[in-house]
Amino acid sequence: MKTGSVSKTGKAKNPSHKICDLDLYVIDGTLKSVTAVTNLTRICHEVLGDKCRVAVIDIEKTPRLAKEGEIVAIPTLVKTFPLPMRRVIGDLSNTERVLAGLGLHPMIKNDAGITRQLHGRPYPHAQSGQGN
């Protein structure tokens, strides 16, 4: 698993296309952290597409960011944009709970640019043949 310190000033090239900014706080090499990175990658590819900026932050290498973010458990996924800030703690194995916990369910369903499937069911606005 590749992780490292991530600049908090990194901006998306076209922020109007982004639904959210996500920071995943991990400890490199732990089973739960590896699982969380894998599950977040899957969620991004299957559900969110290129609509999110994701930063994986190894708190052993950058403990200052964990302190500033008030991280009390690992792994923790934090949605920093749009407000309100939301957190999900754990391995992110339940996609629906992750999206609901981050407050992204309504945004994803209302975004006409996303025509992905969630657990095999197309979103109501997805046209036939466009889902995975």
Image (cartoon, helix red, strand yellow):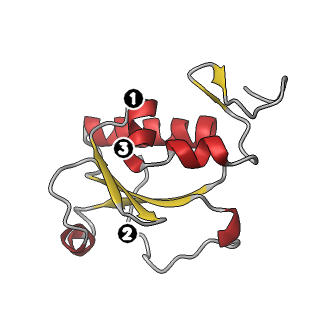
Q: Earlier in the sequence, mark 3 or mark 2?
A: 2
Disc 1: which residue:
94
Q: Is residue 29 left or right of residue 95?
A: left
Report how far apart the C-alphas of labels 2 and 1 lie in the structure. 27 Å
Report how far apart the C-alphas of labels 3 and 2 lie in the structure. 25 Å
Circle 2 or circle 1, nearest the eye:
1
Which sits in the foreground, 93 or 115? 115
Task: Give how far across and how far down residue 25 sits, in percent.
Answer: 31, 56
Task: Give how far across and how far down residue 14 sits, in percent.
Answer: 70, 71
Q: Is residue 124 left or right of residue 19?
A: right
Q: Secondary structure at mark 3?
A: helix
Up/down of 73 relative to 18, above or below: above
Up/down of 13 relative to 131, above or below: below
Up/down of 118 relative to 29, above or below: above
Task: Give how far across and how far down residue 89 sits, in percent.
Answer: 26, 45
- What residue lies at 15% left-to-right and 56% top-to-bottom? 72
Q: Within 10 Å of the Cα at label 3, are there few (<14), some (14-19), or many (20+) other Cα atoms?
A: some
Quarter where residue 48 is shown: top right
Q: Earlier in the sequence, mark 3 or mark 1?
A: 1
Q: Within 10 Å of the Cα at label 2, are there few (<14), some (14-19), or many (20+) other Cα atoms?
A: some
Q: Secondary structure at mark 2?
A: loop
Disc 2: which residue:
5
Quarter where residue 117 is shown: top right
Q: Earlier in the sequence, mark 2 or mark 1?
A: 2
- What residue lies at 43% left-to-right and 49% top-to-bottom? 103
Disc 3: which residue:
101
Which sits in the foreground, 117 or 93? 117
